[in-house]
Image: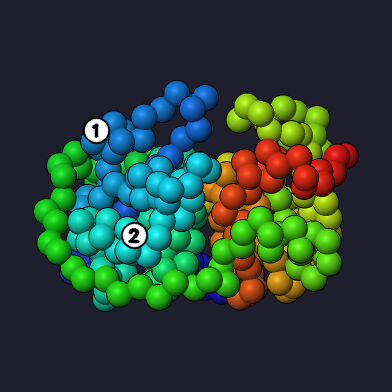
Amino acid sequence: MAKDDPKTLVSTDWLAAHLDDPDLRILDASYYLADAGRDARAEYAAGHIPGARFFDIDEIADARSALPHMAAPAEKFMSRMRALGVGDGHQIVVYDGAGLFSAARVWWNFRLMGKTDIAVLDGGFPKWTSEGRPVEDMAPIIRDRHMTVQRQAHLVKDVTQVAAASKLGDWQIVDARSPARFRGDAPEPRAGLRAGHIPGAKNVHYATLLNADGTLKDPDALRQIFAAADVDVGRRTITTCGSGVTAAIVMLALTRLGNADVSLYDGSWTEWGQFEQLQVAKG
């Protein structure tokens, strides 16, 4: 796969070269766990890539669900994107302030809505700023743009589907959490959740897929990491994590390796870990 692919991942060089394209839309999808002590919206207001709009993962979500930032219904997604001036015919680049953390979740979210002209910025805002590239603190001028969506149901799995996959083994399940959380040795950051993993799941910690500068590792390195975890990169796969954010990084990596049959378990461990009737494996 080419290094710069407007449907998966683009470099800071690519974005800099296309920054003035009239149909380019940039989204800042920064999101941090509470213990990070960072305010994504305040950081966006203080400085962002020129023209970027802020995509609030917790707000552009399904308000009817008790689970955190579950994918929004199509109507809500469309109206929020219209308010951001993002619509049909746009090439979207999404980045985050961690390097590569929450941006992949928004990449998946757009694909779920049938929009494939979206790429994650490799290395994100830290790489962009470290290279001395332009940053602004002004809000972009928003022009309404209609968006047509066609929800791609096969890109998301619910708890019933994941339970069936765990039992039947007809999908491979890959968990992006840290090895200690996967084994059940470390407590979950969210209160009230059991420790451990979905029976039959394999563990590929999302951080192992990234270089020190927050960029995604090259295809050969990714293949080696998946092979070491006994993950078949060509097999249909469900990715999962704590709350459906870093699972999208594993999905992005598998997609870069040519696997077109990857689905994300949106509820992830926040859902699985709270139901006593679901089995939990340890070790």
Q: Amino acid at mark 2?
A: Phe
The N terminus sits in image quarter: bottom right
> Label 1: few (<14), some or many (≥20) within 10 Å?
few
Asked if the residues shown at circle 1 and circle 2 are in contact, with their CB atoms under 8 angstroms apart, the answer is: no
Mark 1 residue element: helix
* Residue 203, horizontal then vertical, whole percent: 76, 49
For marks 1 and 2 on the same chain, the one whose residue lies earlier in the sequence: 1
Residue shown at the point (22%, 50%) measured from the top left: 50
Q: Amino acid at mark 1?
A: Ala
Disc assigned to residue 46: 1
Mark 2 residue element: helix
Q: How many marks?
A: 2
Out of 56 and 20, give the one closest to the viewer.
Answer: 56
Whole-angstrom CA distance, mark 1 to mark 2, is: 26 Å
Residue at the right extreme, as displayed: 283
Residue shown at the point (40%, 75%) measured from the top left: 150
* Residue 27, horizontal then vertical, whole percent: 32, 53
Q: Is residue 199 above or below residue 195?
A: below
* Residue 115, horizontal then vertical, whole percent: 39, 72
Out of 79 and 21, give the one closest to the viewer.
Answer: 79
Q: Is residue 136 above or below residue 81?
A: above
- Mark 2 — residue? 77
Residue shown at the point (80%, 70%) measured from the top left: 170
